[in-house]
Image (spheres, rainbow, N blue to C red):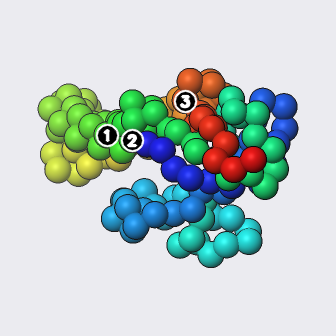
Amino acid sequence: MEETAIVKDVSGIMATVVVQRTSACAHCSSSKVCNSDDDASETEASVIEAINTANAKVGQKVVVELRTYTYLKGAMIVYAMPAIALLLGAIAGKTLLSGVAMFASMKPDVVSAIGGFTALLLSIVAVKLISGRLENKTEYKAVVKKVLDL
């Protein structure tokens, strides 16, 4: 995915850029979680950090690229992992925990819900830890590919 952006700040090899939202953003399910710029309304722009390979300066218009693989991998971690954990936790709760003495007097559906929500909460913690580690890796960051105006 390539987007046009304006460089807001440069710090070492990193650049903070303001990406103008396109009409595709209106249809994106993740549009609400994008960081909005202080100077623009939430529907107009997002502020992201990108690796400044084009050596862009503050105020320049640039092309920013986010690898599709990176975007899809992030979406799988954030959305699919908790959903799968909820489902597997519910199944495990109903089949495994129902036989445990502590849960034997409870209805199987209640035990299933306990197992599912416990697995969901654990997966959310795991997603937070994984995303924190991946956030620091450069291969998962956006890249300033080229400067559009000099």
Query: Which amino acid lies under the numbered mark 1 shown in the image of this protein?
Result: Ala
Q: Which residue is mark 1?
A: 80
Q: Are marks 1 and 2 in contact (CB under 8 Å)?
A: yes
Q: CA distance from mark 1 to mark 3?
A: 18 Å
Q: Sequence-wise, which precedes: disc 1 or disc 3?
A: 1
**What's the residue at 26%, 49% (across, down)?**
113
Q: Based on the displayed image, in which of its 4 quarters is residue 145 positioned?
A: top right
**What's the residue at 34%, 65% (across, down)?**
27
118 horizontally vs 38: left or right: left
Q: Which residue is mark 3?
A: 140
Mark yes or no: residue 85 visible: yes
Numbered disc in front, either 1 or 3? 3
Q: Based on the displayed image, in which of its 4 quarters is residue 63 positioned?
A: top right
SS for callout 2: helix
Q: Which residue is mark 2?
A: 75
The spot of residue 4 in percent (x, y) is: 56, 52
SS for callout 3: helix
140 horizontally vs 124: left or right: right
Q: Nearer the viewer, residue 125 or 93?
A: 125
Query: Which amino acid lies under the numbered mark 2 shown in the image of this protein?
Result: Ala
Examine the rendered structure and indicate whether residue 14 appears above or below residue 83: above
61 horizontally vs 43: left or right: right
**What's the residue at 84%, 31% (across, down)?**
12
The spot of residue 5 in percent (x, y) is: 62, 53
Q: Sequence-wise, which precedes: disc 1 or disc 2?
A: 2
Q: Residues within 10 Å of mark 2 (few under 14, many from 20)?
A: few
Q: Sequence-wise, which precedes: disc 3 or disc 2?
A: 2
Mark yes or no: residue 132 visible: no
